[in-house]
Image (cartoon, helix red, strand yellow):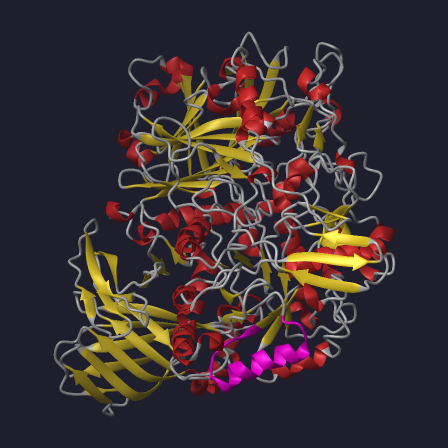
Amino acid sequence: NILTTCVVEEDNSRLILPTSPRRASDITNMVEVFVASKRRGFLSLLLVVGFAVQGFAVDRSKFRTCDQTSFCRRHRDEKSSSLYKYRLTPDSLEFHLPSSEQKGEPEPEDASLWKSFSQRLLGKGQKPLDPYVRGAPPTLTGLLVNVSPDSSSGHKENLHWSVHAMSDGLVRMRIHEVYGVEDSAGKAFESARVTYDELVLIEEELIPAKHAAWMRASEHGDYLKKLVPPSEDINNYTALQYGDTKDGSDKNMVLLIRFAPFSLFLYREDQIETGPIMTLNTQEMMHFELRRFKEGEENTSSKEQAEDTESSSDSDKKDDGKSKKEIVGYWEDGLAIYADGTREEKKAVDEDHTESHRKLTESSALDREGMWEENFQSHKDSKRNGPMSVGMDLSFPGSQHIYGLPEHASSTVLRETIGDGAHYSEPYRLYNLDVFEYELDETMALYGHIPLVVSHSTTTGTSGIFWFNPTETYVDVMQKDDTKGKSTHWISESGIIDIFMLPGGSNPSDLYRQYAKITGKTPLPPMFSLGYHQCRWNYKDEKDVFMVHDTFEELDYPYDVLWLDIEHTDGKRYFTWDSNNFPEPKTMQERLWSQGRRMVTIVDPHIFRDNNYRIHKEATAKGLYVKDKEGKKDYDGWCWPGSSSYLDFTNDSVRNWWADQFAYNKYEGSTTSLFTWNDMNEPSVFNGPEVSMQKDLLNLKGEEHREWHNLYGMLFHKATGMGQIRRNQGEDIRPFVLSRAFFAGSQRYGAIWTGDNKAEWSHLEIASPMLLSMNVGALTFVGADVGGFFGNPDAELMTRWMQAGAYQPFFRGHAHHDAKRREPWMFGEETMRLLRKAAMARYALLPMWYTVFREAELTGMPVMRTMWMQYPKAEQLFSVDNQYLIGADLLVRPVTSAGTLESEVLFPMEDSWYDVDTNRVISAGNGSESEVKAIAVASDLSKIPVYQRGGSILSRKLRLRRSSFMMKKDPYTLYIAMNVKMEAAGTLYMDDEETFGHVKRDEYAIASFSASRTTIENVVEVGSGWATHVDSMKNDRMIERIIIMGIESPPASIQNNSGSNIDFEHDAVTNVLVLRKPEISALSRWVINFN
C-alpha cells in the first residue's frame, strides 16, 4: 500500500491526482493519458507521498438489480399476476402421431402427421409459423388464451402452444406469439420472434418418441383418474403418454395437462403414485408480453421524460458532475478516465430510486415505466417493439435440493431468494457480464450462464428443466410449502417460452445423457491441456519467457503450457506481436516445443479501430461488425485497445471469416504448438451499460443485441476453435481454446475458467462450489485461477491453492500485472517442493483424467462431480460442496482455511476409501447406500485429503517428467483398491492424445481391468484403426507395477499368463501388496493368478 501523490509540471501545466486508485499502476496509466492528451513531452515528473490503494470491492452502481430492471420489476413476486390468466382451449388441440407409428397403417385425414403438421405450422401465404424451430416436430398443439379481463396489452392475447415428445423421455414445450394476425388497430407483425435453435441445439439428437398416445377424458377417464386429484374434474385435464416402447416400459412418461388454469405435470409412468417429478405454472406465474406498436400506447412515464439522458450511441458522457471534462479512456470497471488525469468515482447504489419504483407500482398491477425506453445511469435502451418479457414458475414437488444456474459466486445448492427466511434478496441473474472484482455469496450475474436447474431427491431421483432463452433472465428460488418442494420463477426479457423437461431417473447419469442430447457433450481435449498451465498478465518479452521456462526445467517442475496476455501484441491488435519484445515468436515457440511445451496467446473479440490494422480494415470492408441501433454504422465501444468494433459472431459467415484468420499465413508468427485464450467475450465494453453493449444494437440480420447477448461469448469461442482445426492440413488436430463467457452448449468448444478471482482464502473456498455448479450444468472442463488473479498470496495460500488446482479439471496459475511474481520458486525452496509435489500428483494421474474425460465425451457425465451424483441415496451429502469426486473413484477435500492441521471428510459408507498417499484404508464401507461417516483426517500443509474408492482400479504414470508429451510412452502403475467383497474394476482409455483419430478412424483402445481374490485380468477393446498394428504399440503401453490395497495376507505365489512367477512384496501394516515388473502391456489380453 504505497501512498502516492503525482504532481507533474510542464511549463504552467500541472496534473494532480487527488483521488485514490485501486492499483499502483493506475498512476502510471493516468500520467500516460495526460501525455497523450497534451501530445507533448513532460519537462519534469515528481512523485510524492499521498494516498492508499483501496481494497477490492465490486462497483455495485455499475450493475442493475431487479428493481432497476423494468421487466423484472414488473413481474417479480406476482406483481403482474392479475394481468395474465391462461387457458388452453380444448377444441384447439391437435394430436400428431409419431412417424414410427404410421407405418403400415391407414392415414385418416385427422391423423396424418404431415397434413396436420403442415396445417398447424403453415400460416397465410404458406409462411412458416415459426421458421426458427429445429428438432422433433410437435406431438400436441393448441391455442393458449389469456382470459384475464385486464391484459397488459389491452386486447385479446392468443399464443401458439406445442408439446414435442422425444426419445429417452425428453419433452419440450414451446409457447410463442401468433403472428400475421391484425390487432384492433389493423396492424400485424409479419414474422415470428427470433429464436436460436440452430446455434445451440443438437438437432440430430432431438428425435421424436417412438410411441405417443393422447389420453382424453372422454376415452381414457379411468386412466386420468389416477393422475387428477379427486376433488377436480377430469374433463379439465388431458394427458400425453409417450416413450420409446408402447407397453410395460419403465421408461415411459406421462405429461398431464390442465386446461384452466393452464399448467403441466410430468410423471414417470411407473412411479405415478409418488406424484409428479416436476410441474409448470402451477402457481400461475406465467406471463407473455406480446409485441406491440408504439402508436396509441402510453409513452414513457413523466419521470423518464424529465430525465435528460443521452442516446446509447453517445454514452461516453457521464452524469456525475464531471460531464464537461474530456473523457480519454475507460477502465475495465467502466469508470471514465478524464483528460486531466482524474477518474470517475464509484457511485453508491441509488436506494431512493429503488424505493420510488416500489411506491410507483404499489397501486397498479402494470408498471409502465421502462416499457418503451429504459434508462440506467447515462445509457438509454430503446425498445422498438415495447415490452416483450416472458416467464413462468417451474417446480419440483418433494425435492428440497436444486442446483445449477451457473455462474454465480455462491453455493452449489440453490438457496431461496424470496419468501420468509430467504438467504438472498435478489434473484439469480443470468446475463453475461464482466464484473470487475466480484464479491462472494451473491446472485449477481458473472461471466457466463446456463439456464438449467437440476433437482435431486431420494423419492423423485434426478430431474431437470432447461429454460432455453438466451436473453437476460432472473430466477427466483422459493420453498413450496404445499408439497415441501422447491419452486423457481423465471423472468426473461424477451424471446419465447421454450422449456425442455428432463425426467432423468434414479441415477443422475440418466439426466446427463438426456441433457447431452439437447446441447451436446464435451469432446475429449488434447492430453497437454490437462497438464499445468503457467500464465501471467504479462510475461513481458522473450527473455522473460525463456527465464520462466528454463527455471521450470532446472527445478524438474512439470508444466505443459506457457501463456501470453494482451501485452504481447502490437498495441492490443490481435493476431500481431510486439516486435520489440517478441521479435522472433516462431523461434520462441519452437524452443519451448522442443522440450514438449506449448504456448497460448490471448485473442479477444474487440477489434481496434485502426484503418492500418489488417483485421479491422478487412472486417470493415466486408461489413462484419455489430451495428448501431439504426443498423447503419458499425458500433464503436471502448476496450483494451481504445476505440473498438465488435464482430457479429451470431452470423455464420463472420464465424467462418474469423476462423480463417488463424491460418498460419495470416496469423504470422503462429505455429502448430500455439493455442488460444478468448477473454472479454461477454462482450465487455468499458463505456457501455453494465460494461457491455447496448441492448438495442443490431446484428447483421437486424436482430437486437438483447435477443442474443448470452450467446455471444459461446459463438466467439466456437469460431476460434474452428480456426484452430482448419489451420492444419486434414483438420485432424484437436483444438484448445479457453473462454471466460459461456452459455448452454459451451462444453462443445473448450475450457472455461471462473474469471478474475482474488488471492484470498474465501476465493479458494468458493472455487469448489462454483466449479461444481458449472459441472451440474454439464460444463465440465473448468477451473479457477490458482493463487487468485488479484492480490498476492502468501506461501501457505499458494500451496493450498496449487493442491486444490491439481484436482480441478482445468489447472492454470495466473496473476494480475500488479501482483508480485508468483512462479513456484518465488516462495522459497520448501514451498517450491510442496507446490511441485502437488503438480506431480496431477501428472501421475493424467491417465485417469484422460479416461474420465473420454467418459464425458461418450456419456455426458461431468468430470468433477458433486457427491450426490455418485451417491444418490445419501441425503447427508446433498448439500455438500466442499468436497467432490473426480469421476467415480477419487474423493477430494481441498483445504481452504489458514493454519489447518485437520479436516473433516464425509465418507459414503456404500464403499471403502483408501488414502492415496499411504494406500491405507481410511473408511471401511458396509454397503449402505444412505449412510455417511464423518472422519477427522490429518491435513497439514503437505497434505490434501484425497481418497480412492474401494472397488476401483486407477492407472498412474509415476516417472517424473517435465511435460505430458514427455510421458507419452512411459509405463503405467495400476492402483487396485479392493472393496469389501475383495473385488475391483476400472478402465484405461488410450489414443494418440492429440488428433481426431479416435473419432475419425477408430484409433483407440480401452483396457478393462478387473480383480478378485485370485486373479487380475485385462480385456482389451481395440478400435479398428489400431487393430492392424496394435502389436507394434504394446511396448509403448507397458505396465511396470501393480499396487493392491486391502490385502490382509500375501499369496503364496503369483504367476502371469505363461506361468512365470512375478516378484511381489506385502506390507502387513498397511495391507498393501506390490507386484513388480509383471511384464504385461495395457494393450494385451492377460490374466494374473494368485496362489
Residue range corresponding to the magenta coloring: 539-561
Residue furthest bottom in the image? 1060
Q: Which quadrant of the view contains residue 664?
A: bottom right
Q: Quadrant of the N terminus?
A: bottom right
Q: Which quadrant of the view contains residue 799?
A: bottom left
Q: Is residue 433 above or below residue 383?
A: below
The answer to whether residue 92 is left or right of residue 578 is: left
Residue 354 in the image: x percent, y percent? 55, 25
Residue 833 in the image: x percent, y percent? 40, 79
Q: Is residue 27 visible?
A: yes
Residue 1043 in the image: x percent, y percent? 26, 79
Viewer-side residue, 896 vs 277:
896
Q: Residue at x 33, y 34 (%)?
A: 269
Q: Which quadrant of the view contains residue 892?
A: bottom left
Viewer-side residue, 126 vs 588:
588
Q: Is residue 137 above or below residue 587?
A: above
**Is residue 865 in the magenta section?**
no
Q: Is residue 147 above or below residue 759?
A: above
Q: Is residue 997 above or below residue 859?
A: below
Q: Is residue 503 visible?
A: no
Number of numbered discs present? 0
